[in-house]
Image (cartoon, helix red, strand yellow):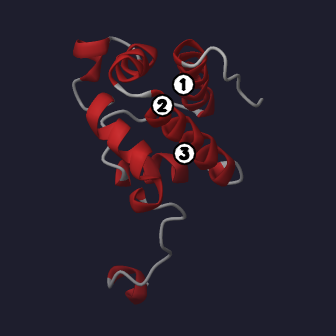
Amino acid sequence: MADEEKGGGPTPPMRASDFATLSAFLRGYLHQDFRAEHETVAGAVEAYCREATPPEVDRLRTEVEHFVSESRALPFEAVQGALMEFHSGWLPAGPAEWLELVKALNACLRKRTPKRGLAG
């Protein structure tokens, strides 16, 4: 217990620095007031896709897919904890809401780069 109080407890499985694009997206588009600005997670993704270049959108999609893959075996509370470390103003209520973000990004990438196609 003393080690945890001194910061010696378990480290988060995922750090914001390992997911720089995802972290920047969460801070910039899913901030505390995103519902007033974009209404939904999909609306925030659409705004990002309008403003980002196709390679930026692709990097974000790749990082989200990596994050989902890395977090699949974790309790959902750990996923939410990682998102809090990323300074997201939005925390998904459950895994289905998190996967909604992945689907929105995939749809966005298809629109931005229609000839490219997506894996999966």
Q: Earlier in the sequence, mark 1 or mark 3?
A: 3
Q: Are marks 1 and 2 in contact (CB under 8 Å)?
A: yes
Q: Which residue is mark 3?
A: 63
* Numbered label attached to residue 59: none
Q: Is residue 48 left or right of residue 100?
A: left
Q: Secondary structure at mark 3?
A: helix
**Res 46 quadrant in image:** top left
Relative side of 103 to 5, left or right: right
Q: Residue at x 57, y 19 (%)?
A: 113
> Crowdedness of circle 3 by 10 Å Cα count: few (<14), some, many (20+)?
some
Q: Report helix, strand or loop for mark 1.
A: helix
Q: In the rendered structure, which amino acid carries the disc numbered 3?
A: Glu
Callout 3 touching callout 2 (CB < 8 Å): no
Q: Which mark is residue 105?
A: 1
Image quadrant in which the N terminus is located: bottom left
Residue located 44% across and 36% down the image: 56
The quarter in which the C terminus is drawn is top right
> What residue sits right under mark 2 in the picture?
57
Tally of numbered discs: 3
Q: Position of residue 99 (x, y in %)?
A: 61, 29
Can you give x and y, in whole percent of width and height, for residue 97 in the image? 55, 26
